[in-house]
Amino acid sequence: MAKNKMKAKKRIYLLEDHAIVREGLRLLIGQEPDMEVCGDAGGAAEAFSAIQALRPDAIITDISMPGMSGIEFIKNLKALHPEIAVIVLSMHTESDYAERALRAGATGYVMKTENAGEIIIALRKAFLGEKHLSGKIVDSLLRKALGTLAMEGPSSPLEALSDRELEVFEHIGNGKDTNDIAASLGVSPKTVETHRMHIKEKLRISSLSDLIRHAAVWVDHKNSGNQ
């Protein structure tokens, strides 16, 4: 009689700048009999060469990381390896981030506030070629589609911002100054100033004080709308 061949485990790579989150994901995935973590990194630059060698079946990534953002990473990864599934694990409940991640090629978007099992569900659906979104994200996208979010209609001015500019805009709304934003994103203060200038131009805002006010109102609205 022919021996049954053991089915190869699905291999997952972790891209997350917080080591404690990576370790938690490693333990969680390790409990699944048909999955394993094949590697991890704290930044996109480090991850690319490893992914090229390891060729995982799926990648779990954050959006907010130093240097290259998670959305930029997804775009670049999909251009090279369209077959690799990407699950975003994020603290952002705002639908703008989820939409951008999905457009970039993400297969799923899971909130860090969800139960741990949600990431396993997202992975299993990804392996079947299906998408998975956290409930809060589905609700947020639905409200936006129905036009009930006063500041986030289908033709929101924020759509004109690049992925990185949207990150900078949110940091401004959270009260961070240029040096704080630069440190958070792993870029130079001059780069942040350039992003800030482009944001003002695209949103037709003339002064820094008005930019800070608009950003703060948007962040407050975003946070209150997702509670």
Image (cartoon, helix red, strand yellow):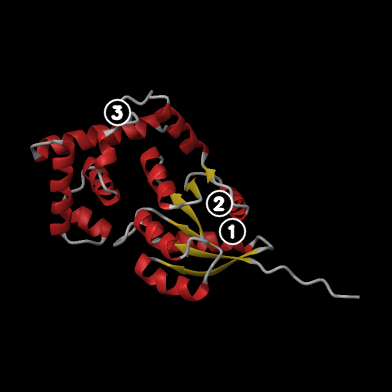
State left or right for residue 46 relative to residue 7: left
Closer to the chain start, of discs 3 and 2, is 2
Near mark 2 (Cα within 10 A), the count class, few <14, some 14-19 or many ≥20, is many
Residue at 18%, 44% in the rendered image: 199
Q: Mark 3 or mark 1, which has the lower sequence index?
A: 1
Cβ–Cβ below 8 Å for labels 3 and 2? no
Front-lying residue, 113 or 8: 8
Q: Amino acid at mark 1?
A: Leu
**Relative height, residue 176 to residue 70 (above, below):** above
Can you say whether 185 is above or below 110 in the image? Answer: below
Secondary structure at badge 3 equals loop
Q: Position of residue 214 (x, y in %)?
A: 20, 34
The numbered mark at residue 197 is none
Does residue 206 sit above or below 26 in this rendering? above
Q: Which residue appears at 40% of the width and 42% of the height?
A: 99
Please give the name of the residue rendered at 82% of the width and 71% of the height, measured from the top-left corner: 4
The quadrant where residue 10 appears:
bottom right
Q: Nearer the viewer, residue 140 or 182?
A: 140
Cα–Cα span, label 1 and label 2: 9 Å
| Position in image of residue 179 (x %, y %) | 17, 56
In this figure, which residue is indicated by the disc labeled 3?
Answer: 151
Give the amino acid at mark 2: Ile
- Where does residue 1 sit, x and y in percent of width and height? 91, 75
- Identify the residue position indicated by label 1 in the image: 28
- Left or right position of 5 against 109: right
The relative height of residue 43 versus residue 184 in the rendered view (above or below) is: below
Asked whether the beta carbons under mark 1 and mark 2 sit within 8 Å of each other, the answer is yes
Q: Which residue is mark 2?
A: 119
Select label 3 or label 2 by which is in front: 3
Q: Nearer the viewer, residue 144 or 46?
A: 144
Q: Residue at x 41, y 74 (%)?
A: 49
- For residue 226, say whether it is visible: yes
